[in-house]
Amino acid sequence: MAVFERTYHRYDGPLTTRRRRFLVVPRYALAEVMRSRAFVMFYLLCFLLPFAGLIMIYLRHNLSALKLLNVPLDRLREALPIDGRFFAQGLAVQGFLAFLLAVVVAPALISPDLRNNGLALYLSRPFSRAEYVSGKLSVLALLISTITWIPGILLFLLQGYLEGAGWFVGQLRVLAALFAGSWALIVSLSLLALAVSAWVKWKPVARIVLLILFFVLNGFGRVMELALGTWWSELLSMRMVIETVWAGLFGLAPPSGMPAAAAWTALVAGSLLCLGLLLRRVRAYEVVR
Amino acid sequence: MPDSPIVELDGLGVSLGGRAVLRDLRASLAGRCIGLLGPNGAGKTTLLHTLLGFFRPDAGTARVFGKDIRTEAAAIRAQMGYMPETDSFIAGMSGVRFVRLMAELSGLPPAAALERAHEALFYVGLGEARYRPVDSYSLGMKQLVKLAQALAHGPRLLFLDEPTNGLDPPARRRMLDLIRGIRDGGEARVILSSHLLRDVEECCEEVLVLKNGRVAVYANLEAERRANRRLLELDVRAADGVPAAPAFAELAAALGCECAPGARQRLKLVLPDGVEARDMFRLAAGAGLQIRRLDYKRDSLEDIFLKAMEGDAANGRL
């Protein structure tokens, strides 16, 4: 179809593999997300805590630097031990930032496609609904991974290297908890954010709904717990559910009376519900009954 | 030589929301450009969507280029380009980026997809606007960019769903020219769904008319046009100007013509093989009659469509 000829010709060149085709959606979606300077600034801010953790670990193992700062080593070691709690608290802060990131990114990934009937264009190609959903999910998974388990594991490895093999082997559970806890957050949060975005279809409203779901249900669960004296109502609070899951993984005391098994069940059931809602919406055309 | 079938409908039935939308469709579509006609709600778009694999048939099946839509949907879609009826685009992207994304999703490597995206946009006449965001395009430009994304990956079969919807006359003319250009190039077959008879008549060689989810008529327009050359309408008068159709009908019937009275006291007749229109003039002159008007009575697409809408769905040819 050369421009000068202005006639239609079929394409007979090489085609990409199906696996490579799957990467097209995440590549384009990531590029669109990163076009926003405000988002890039926010994303960079998400690395502040891991950077602070890096400095802390470095200083703990660098006596001369601590002396220069006139910090008593023993008091610092006691005040800020590098253990499961250190990484769990870091993950909690990064988890909240991940939630904000999902609030910003997820509606931009999926709402415009549904609002502008873009799905018919995606799905009229050799490209399935599962590939579309997993392509969009992978963008959130990648972004959240870079601010949760990837820096967490890098800090853990640094600490293990500086502290010695004994500490590393003794804290292996923390390594597993960092990875599993982060992925529990990534999967549940991404599915929730994409499902809400798919149903609301309008970016600003989808963001508001996500904030309401997080903060209002969290507050409601807390109030109901105080009023009724039972942890059941806290199953509505995503924050409480995920923190209970993390506490179980890191071997720490749970933040409420909710058993870890109940939290895992709620997380899995909620994720499956969100996946169902998402797949119900991600169709080339809706059938009006 | 007849073309090999592009689409074969084999008892295809589709229900949506508990309602049968397509029922027992049977046809073999083989032309370079096939029109899909029918009133609103006849099932034209549902048929296209079913062939694309958006809806699962609940009875029968269909084959596109010999591939079954139930089992080889992805392989079928790899050879198709689809221009939807509704506004469809990816917001926030320039025209060229949008078309490139669609070409890459169809399997083109990034560099080839970019090259084809530029070419497709120039081809449809959006070359100058290709760096503008698609959201900012006018309705006519959005129709053209939808055509560009359907063409960019070089499909063998194009589904165009109401491509002239909302276009002003020059834009409509341009769109029809493009469709005819694609048809005449022979590199891609076209299925054009429209409720505008004139669009279909200008572009298509075959037409499938749907009514209430059934095939009302499947006609080869070229064959119809050829057959219509044997159908005449005559205004026959005596020397004093009095209509003389019945008298002439008797003479023509003796030559083997099938005759029927037409409107305004005219005579409709079908010429048998070996009898030409000039023989009618000889016949009239011999009987002292005058043929004051002779029309090749063309059975237009509108006639075909109206007959299909009047009669019961017959799952057959005219």
Image (cartoon, helix red, strand yellow):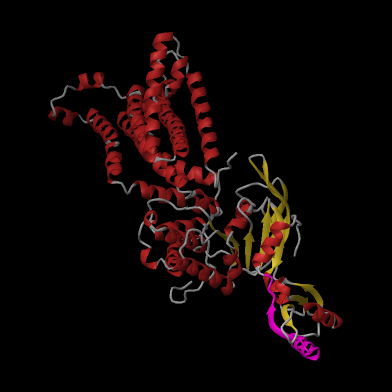
Decide if residue B1 is in sight here: no
> Residue A54, image x and y in percent?
27, 33
Residue in view at x 55 percent, y 34 percent: A276
Asked if residue B297 lies in the magenta stretch, the reply is yes
Task: Give the image quarter of residue A152.
Answer: top left
Quarter of the picture containing the C terminus of chain A is top right
Residue at (81% x, 85% y) in the render: B274
> Where is residue B156 shown, x and y percent of the image?
59, 65
Quadrant for residue A204, please give it.
top left
Task: Return the residue nearer the eye: B74 or A250.
Answer: B74
On the rendered structure, is B232 left or right of B100?
right
Image spot of residue B265 (x, y percent): 73, 74
Rendered location of residue A114, percent (x, y)? 47, 45
Q: Is residue B239 left or right of residue B52?
A: right
Query: Which residue is located at x 46 percent, y 52 percent?
Result: A24
**In the image as oriented, which residue stretches furthest toward the front?**
B240
The one nearer the camera, B120 or B45, is: B45
Query: From the viewer's perspective, is residue B23 above or below residue A170?
Result: below
Name the foreground residue: B250 vs A222: B250
Q: Is residue A32 left or right of residue B291?
A: left
Magenta-highlighted residues = B277-299
